[in-house]
Image (cartoon, rainbow, N blue to C red):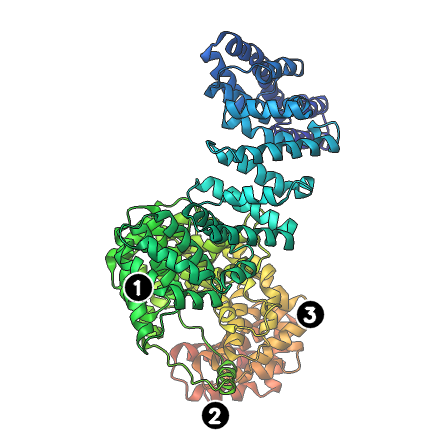
Amino acid sequence: MADSSTIQRAEELVAQARACIEQRQLQKATQLAKEAASLAPTNKNVQALVQSLSQAESDGSQVLSLVRSYVEYGDQKDGQEAVNLLKQHVAVPTDHIDDVAHLLFDHDGKPTQIRDELTGAFVINSAAARKQLANRIQVGTEATRYFRLLWRRGEHSFNSILPVLLDAEAWPSTEVQTQAKRDAFLLALGKLLDPALEHGEWSMTLIARLLTSNAHDMAGLIDRDAFEIVLAQLDIRLDTKIRAQATLAVAKLLEETREEGEAIFTDYITNGVAKGHNDELIVAFSAAASVFPLVPQTVAKLFLTPGFLEGLVPVLERNSMGQRKSHRLEQAAMELLSAACVDKACRESISKVAYDWLDDVAHTSTESAAASMAALVLAKIPPKPESEESSITHADDLSSLLVNLTMNASSPAEQQSSIEGLAYTSLQPKVKMEIVSNSALLNKLIERLKSTTTADPCTFGILTIFSNLVSYRPAQSEEQQKMSQLKNYAEAKKPEDKDPLDDDKHVTARCRTVLDADLVPVLVAAARSHYTVTILGIAAKILHALAREQKHRGKLAQQGAVKLLLQTIDRLQTPTGPTSSSDSAQAAIHLAAHALARILISVDPNHVFSRAMPAISALRPLTLLLTPDTNSETRDLLPVFESLLALTNLASLEDETVKDALLRQAWDPTQDLLLSSNKLVQRASVELVCNLMASPAGVAKYADGSAAAKQRLHVLLALADAEDDATRCAAGGALAMLTEWDAAANAVLKHERGIPILLDLCADQSDDVKHRGLVCVLNVISAPGDVGVKGLDKVVQCDGLEEIKDSLRECRDANVMAVGVEVLKAIMAKDGNKGKAITQG
């Protein structure tokens, strides 16, 4: 029988083999399986692996005969069966690879879907197949022939070129591989020059991937002609797939060529505009709009060149007169204007020069898409300075127009522009109130959110609208308020009046409306697919605002907000998810954790958590809030305070695993916060410690006899003497539970001020504090053995009998009196004073 180390090694080999199968490295998987079988032939996992590989090998041996039957005799059924097998990643036997490659690569038959899928699956499925294709395209003339052959055959076949070009193992040398990449790059560029080209996205994807994988391999090929060919693919009249890939390619080209590339781009736009024909204008505006976010300073400089915008608007106005001859020209121009709004100077220039034209298109165009785009640009730019009320009129008019366009949009493009415009105008308090009072619009936005499966621009726009509706004004500390006043004074600015429609009362009412509109369940469903830092961040921001009002928290929990917040934090923190180290990801995690804390303060954790979602899953995000942000100059203590309250609530659960995990994860930061100068934070820290004393592991923190335990007890006793009633009460509660253990009681006795502080608790004017102090004294004097004897002696030495009598004289709480009487009886019984009246004196 194999020993444990041999079995462990066999299991490791099985895991490696299965990983190879997933990566389509079937030959390597077979070798690993053989080694595993030699070590542990009777192991069930090893046997299952060998059996699955044997089946795959058996299936793989059929591929050659099936492909031959299809290629030579046209048997459709056999061809489809071969496709199915290859898509299941079966291994074609090594001695069959040459023949299959010959049948698929060297027979230029009639293009069919089966032939196309066969070629693509064969290359993607097998490293040996990629090597076969690489051998055929090493020579320039052959590269051209196979490029054309695979293009004619179809998308799967043509797309198989890229994995071959990027697979270093398929080539005899790096030099040969690089030359093949360069040949393919030039052939793809040449294809884009074909005026009758179909499926241009195939070529554009190949170009973009070659550039993003290693643009240095294209050195010498990236000249003005190549750059201009790619820029032409940004034309809004082309398919969005081509434009998306062209944008990636241009970004990489600009990164590689820097100033030279920016100069080529500027010349391309300038020359296109100078020609003045609609076709050239559309291409130039399209390219400028796409490139604006990539190099905003360069494009803004071009946009602000004297005469550029001033010359553009008359052309657009002439086009708009009468029947609007070119809707595409309007669209391209407005996409450029919209993109230019990222720059403040450009926004001001657009408002000055193009406002009237945009306003005319927005209100009179029969094309909803054009009207929506124009309204979007108007939403981004400042109003035309005509009167003091122009800003209000501008926002009101636009908001009504955009609401109407959103409600009646007949295409995704129209809806996208109008929703994005609303996202801008909804920053205005009056517009927020108009949107939130329009139930039909809210339902329309939520229904649109339900229908999306990817993080499209509409999703971002809709969530931005809801975020604007529910966002409270940021709280300012006294110091921040003073700094703001000083800044206004230095700049001779009058403080802006705060709009009453954005005060806390109005925001809370808007939050209630949004909550009742059932946005949260949609967010729960949408977050599964909208997996981006931005989308998750906005969702967290919305939930953070909704959870501010205590009355909202129960419904938030019912609608799945806790699960959504935990999933959001988990996705943002996982290495495979969005970049967890980015500032935006960290901000989203912080907001989500704070929202989680707010909800868990006000709900019974027994009703929220289950086996599927255990309470322990909430501990780590809540603990994150307890540690200071090293990148921030100031620290907001509200999240810290509310996190402590939430953790205290979780610590009240009977589940010992929760308390143990809390002690591991939150103990150190909580100990630091016990010394906080903020009374509320300090109080909440003590309350958390109090709840943790129900755990033996928590008691051990104070009673294990170590120097650290003595220091902790010193701090806790000091807090029992704090000025704040609630802090004393919580510290007294912690001591009451601690002293139930004789080791902890002994530790209190060893402290110089231990018994005096307990007696001070007994004398406290608060009955709650008094009750806890009496329990502590009772525990100490009732402890078994020497501890109890020492406890009684210390209490008597400190005149405890009289102090406790005095404290009970004015007490009216029956529970406190009962404990007090029990303490007095215990003292007097042990002190040999049984005959004296308990209440004497």
Residue 827's disc number? none
* Rendered image quadrant of residue 543: bottom left
Q: Tell me the kind of residue under disc 2.
A: Gly
Q: Tell me the kind of residue under disc 3.
A: Ala
Q: CA distance from mark 2 to mark 1?
A: 83 Å
Q: CA distance from mark 2 to mark 3?
A: 43 Å
The answer to whether one can see residue 659 in this image is no
**Left or right relative to 487: residue 430:** left
Nearest to viewer (mark 1 / mark 3): 1
Residue 841's disc number? 2
Dot 3, how many residues are within 10 Å of its Cα: few (below 14), some (14-19), or many (20+)?
few
Residue 770 horizontal/vertical position (percent): 47, 81
Q: Tell me the kind of residue under disc 1.
A: Leu
Disc 3 element: helix
Residue 228 horizontal/vertical position (percent): 56, 44
* Rendered image quadrant of residue 1: top right
Residue 30 horizontal/vertical position (percent): 67, 22
Dot 1, how many residues are within 10 Å of its Cα: few (below 14), some (14-19), or many (20+)?
many
Residue 398's disc number? 1
Disc 1 element: helix
Pointer 1 or 3: first along the chain:
1
From this view, report whether residue 7 is shown above or below residue 42: below
Pointer 2 or 1: first along the chain:
1
The answer to whether one can see residue 315 in this image is yes
